[in-house]
Amino acid sequence: MITEPFKTYPEIKRLAGGYFETLRKTAEEGGTVAWGPASIPAELLRAMDIEYVLGEPYGALCAASGLAGELLPVTEDYGFTTRFCAYSRNFIGSYLTGKSPLGKLPEASFMIGFRAGCNDHAAWFETLGGMAGKPCFPIDLPQCYEPPAERHIAYVQSQLDHLIQFMEQVSGKKMGEGRLVQAVRNAHELKVLWTQILDCCKAVPAPLNFRSQTSFMIAAVWLKGTREAVDAYTALLSEVKDRVRRGVGSVPEERARLLWDNVPMWFYPRVFNYLEEKGLIPIVCPYMLGWGDRDLKYSQYPEESKELLKWQEPSTREEALRESAKTYIRSHVSLNNCLSSKLNHYTGLAQDFRIDGAIFHSNWGCKSLSLGRLEVAEHLRERFGIPALVFESSMADPGGFNERELLGKLDTFARSFER
Amino acid sequence: MNGEMGSALSSGRHDLGRALKDQGKKLLGYLCAYCPEEIVYAAGLVPVRIFGGGGPFPLAGSYLPDYYCAHARGCLNAGLAGEYDYLDGILLPYACLHTQGAYDSWARQAKGKYTRFIDMPSLVDTAEALAFFAEELEAFKKSLEDAFGVSITEGKLQEAIRLCNRNREFLREIYMRKREDRPLISGAEVFSLILANMVGPKDEQGLTRLIADLSSRHVPGHRPARVMVLGTELDDPRIFSAVESQGAIVVADNLCTGSRYIWQDVELSGDPTEAIARRYLLGVNCPLKRPAERGLRLVEELMETFRVEKALFMWPQACDPMGWAVPVMKGMLDKRGIPYRWVTMRGDGSEEDISAVTKVAAELVGG
């Protein structure tokens, strides 16, 4: 099997680096910067030239850069002794110490809380707002165990409308209708492109593996709403399709195709080398797909609800906010809905991506993304007769991480593919 | 204390549930303090708060790893073990993801039973949150009507609101007796009463009798130290007894199984569903809900009302909502000059928890 480096990666890396530079300059020059979780409607901020630090990727950077060991004890000493979201604990530690993987944590003008299945995301930024003396605007997404209806859309849309009013007040800037519409369109296009890129991994061999997906996802997370990100993903999709046509895989050997569940341990990327050495290649991850837009493909909602939530090209402020609300509900419920919905979702992925096995990171650093996964793992074993390994760790807290134990489990798991 | 209620709470709560079932009653179990009991009563059902009881929780372990809280794992374990087989349904008003996990796994196994998840805003003090939650409660009402073949009229709702308001009023009256310098009733007794009123029908007669009987009790000889328990969910009165065994009285608490269950009534004017929505959004004050300062204000109000002298954090491991609230709460106590101690608890009703509480309470009271 052949493999080769990605030609489009340098451009995505350049865009991401450029964003961090813009962020730094904006903060230095006293411009408006927001802090919030990665799920915030960043395209709305983008349309007002408000820059932002996103909590989860920032927490991941803290862990990946080796800072977590210094930051987490400071957070704990401050009084946050509960092991809630590991990203938030890194972020708070960075705020308290002034140590940052970006050199300096850009100072915030305001916070946005966003509950999309995870209550910590609301508490995190309200708490930081209190600590930093900055206002926080919280937003809620409904869980939608019952089929989404107009009232769910109206609830989110109304909050987004108020968010704009809040941002206008705090920043002194005005939201332009044209820019809002364009940013919402760009954000949607980016999500669709990202889904199409990841869907190419249904091919054998998969043109991307989970590790390379984590490198490329930065645009889907940080650069929502920009034309540059859309252009970069358009080029990436073209390259990925070309790799599929030519049978170019992500690694020399794809012995077993795996579903990787949850966020990886950012402080321990070696796990993927270890798997690759054995030809075990994670090619699909529900969390990764959550940054795209699959239009509720695996949802058990009635067609009426799916139809209601379908994207419709907006051309006014009101339509843009409505489409934005629908997009966030769609993205959220595809990953965080009730257990039977999760089982449907994973079953669909296992079939479509032709997986041979699954690894579930039971992630105590993110209890939201770990909910129900023991049953999902058991379901995949029973339904498809495939091995499904579950191991516990944290995405951004290396405390208590036992490398030897994990590698032992992976060895045993690998042997199940020898039969 | 009221004997029937005491036994309903301790070993007898499942016996009570089965007895009610034998009498032809329908029972709806719920997993969080945000259950709108008024709507359940209006549907002719008895709401039953689900508690986990003591650990370990071997059945729950296959569904919820132990980094989820002991309360959620205990409830799930009890459900999977069939301890609540007399329930006709299970309800989760969405608050934290720990109980969400317990509900998800239990509901999946509860074939043929009514199951319902009520969507709840986490941001509670906005007009759109109230409108959304009121609509959600309308949908809940409709689902009960469909599932149990009943009609929930406005008259039935008003009647249920009065029933629950009276119950809260009685419990508050008893709770307020702890304002006295030498209270005639202990914190453990009051706590047991509140718990008992969550696991069975509202017992107005029993509460009335108790209030009348209190006046015949002897005034204690010493003035106990006045302690407030700070936490989220506790359901074991032995914890309060452990504190009180050290020469203190638990005059107040901010538990969802304590003061937060009784502190606010439903308004009787206006649309009843909206009034219920408002009470649960604004009156329960879980530290999970935003803005968090609402919960803090309630704690301060209770501290003043009950002239709290010391505070005891009872922290169930893995309770994330409480974890977020702690530094702000500590800051408030420091500002008020109220000494406090901290107990980390397994939350599984173990003897270790009781011993830990006793030890720390002794330090707090003696210090």
Image: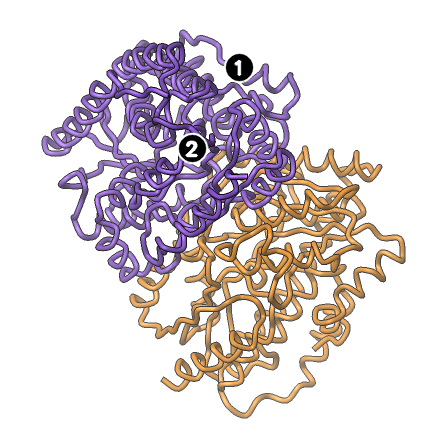
Q: Quadrant of residue B174?
A: bottom right
Tell me: residue A68, above or below residue A286: below
**Mark 1 to mark 2 CA distance (whole Å):** 30 Å
- Identify the residue at horizontal 56%, vertical 20% (top origin): A297
- Identify the residue at horizontal 45%, vertical 65% (top origin): B315
Q: Amino acid at mark 2?
A: Pro
Q: Which residue is mark 1?
A: A310
Residue A397 visible in image: yes
Q: Amino acid at mark 1?
A: Lys
Residue A173 visible in image: no
Tell me: residue A104, above or below residue A97: above
Q: Position of residue B2 (x, y in %)?
A: 73, 75
Quadrant in which the C terminus of chain A appears: top right
Tell me: residue A277, above or below residue B6: above
Q: Chain B appears what colour? A: orange
Q: Quadrant of residue B18?
A: bottom right
| Left or right: residue B346 compared with residue A408 | right
Q: Position of residue B152 (x, y in %)?
A: 78, 38
The chain containing the residue under callout 1 comes to A
Q: Check residue A292 in the rendering and tell me which mark sits there, or answer none.
A: none
Task: Identify the element where label 2 is drawn.
Answer: strand
Q: Chain A appears what colour? A: purple
Farthest residue toward the left? A29
Q: Position of residue A204 (x, y in %)?
A: 46, 20
The chain containing the residue under callout 2 comes to A
Q: Nearer the viewer, residue B263 or A354?
A: A354
N-term-proximal mark, 1 vs 2? 2
Q: Check residue A282 in the rendering and tell me which mark sits there, or answer none.
A: 2
